[in-house]
Image (cartoon, helix red, strand yellow):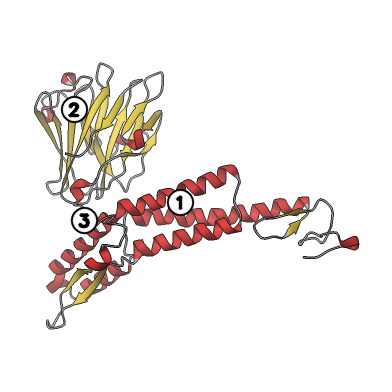
Amino acid sequence: MSTGIGGKKQCVTCNKSGGILTCDGCGKTFCGKHVIEHRQELAAKLDNIMQEHDLLQQEIEQPSARKNSLLQKIDRWEKDSILKIQIAAESARRSLLDLLEQAKAPLSKIYDDITDDLHSAREADDFSEHDLDRWKKQLKDLELQVTFPPAAKLVPDKNNPIYLMQLHIDDSLNNNSPSRKDGSANQSNSTLQERFLQSLGPVRFEEGGFIARHTSPVSDYAYVRGRLLYLRGSHTIRFRLEKCKQPYYIFFGCMSSKVNLQEDAFRLPSSVGWFGSNQAYEQGRCSRGCKKSEFNSNKIQPNDVLQITLDCSQMEIRLYHERMKTTCVLGVDPKLTPFPWQLLMVLCNPGDTIRILPNT
């Protein structure tokens, strides 16, 4: 630490002793001008960490071969033996993605905690080098859990001329991984609970994302997407219309997660679902009338329970009205609505409120 005449502290940048301030994080002293520059440098470093944090979110939500070493090996192996081992490659890839899906919830919890810390520090402008180092280490540790699953490895069967490969899961390691908080078996995909996550327009999420409430005093489109991505199988989500102004005008459906949430999302070619006024939307095309998929929005009332099923295997979605015991079906073109799919809802009337019910 430099000192001036008379033992005064000097700014480490300009060596002047006027208006000296000391940074608690690095212990260095700065003048009034350069302490501002120092805070700007720290803010830039925080921006870099938040950028890494955002990229890591993409990897948690949708694991890719770009980052995941096991997926990279599977892809290379498949290309070397395309004709003879395509079935084995798909089996191994599916097992790995299932494992990553099971670990998504606990990893997302850790990620959300880091998110809260970063945003709180940014808003309060209350952080130092120690905090930056801690957040960077937390993100690095989380990235290692996402990109190098400790409980999985690829095991070649070298007895075959063109060997087959399967995903081997080490249960002894998996018991200590974030995907299990006790000694119970891994949860199946059917136990994953949908919640509201993304929004555009006048809507507020309540009770941890289980409720979406239209907040504008006038009719206006409010767009909502769920947090889960649907790649395969069939998945059913139940909703209660806790408040529903008549005439009914709420959209239930799905869209491709590869398309950004935007205005008029239900009119995009990647969207499929049902709206008020007996409207059915298929890949952006609207048809009206009760005959279309047997949908009759006039029968829907407040407190009704609806079920929407996203059936990736059959390439369709189904809307079931529990009180009326009626089912509507719409086909989904995977070329226009590529996987993974996401739940899409649109609220229009003031006060309209939808609750996601627990999985049965």
Q: Earlier in the sequence, mark 2 or mark 1?
A: 1
Residue carrying label 3: 186
The numbered mark at residue 131 is: none
SS type, badge 1: helix
Q: What is the x, y in percent for residue 122?
A: 56, 46
Measured in 3D between alpha carbons, the distance from the residue under mark 3 to the one under mark 2, in whole angstroms, is 30 Å
Disc 1 packing (10 Å; few <14; some 14–19; many ≥20)? some
Asked if residue 105 is positioned above or below residue 204 in the image, the reply reads below
Q: Which residue is mark 2?
A: 305
Label 2 Cα neighbours within 10 Å, binned few <14 / some 14-19 / many ≥20: many
Q: Quadrant of the N terminus?
A: bottom right
3 vs 2, front mark = 3
Give the Cα separation between the discs numbered 3 and 1. 25 Å
Q: Residue at x 27, y 58 (%)?
A: 100
Residue 270 seen in the current view: no
| Depth check, front residue: 248 or 132 | 132
Residue type (three-letter) at the residue carrying disc 2: Val
Please state which of the two labelled residues, at mark 2 or mark 1, is closer to the viewer.
1
In which quadrant of the rendered view does residue 213 lie? top left
| Residue 228 image point, x, y percent | 28, 46
State the residue lying farthest toward the top: 246
Amino acid, disc 3: Asn
Element at label 2: strand
Where is residue 132 shown, x and y percent of the image? 55, 57
Disc 1: which residue:
114
Q: Tell me whether the residue at label 2 lies in contact with that at label 1, contact meaning CB atoms closer than 8 angstroms.
A: no
- Mark 3 or mark 1, earlier in chain: 1
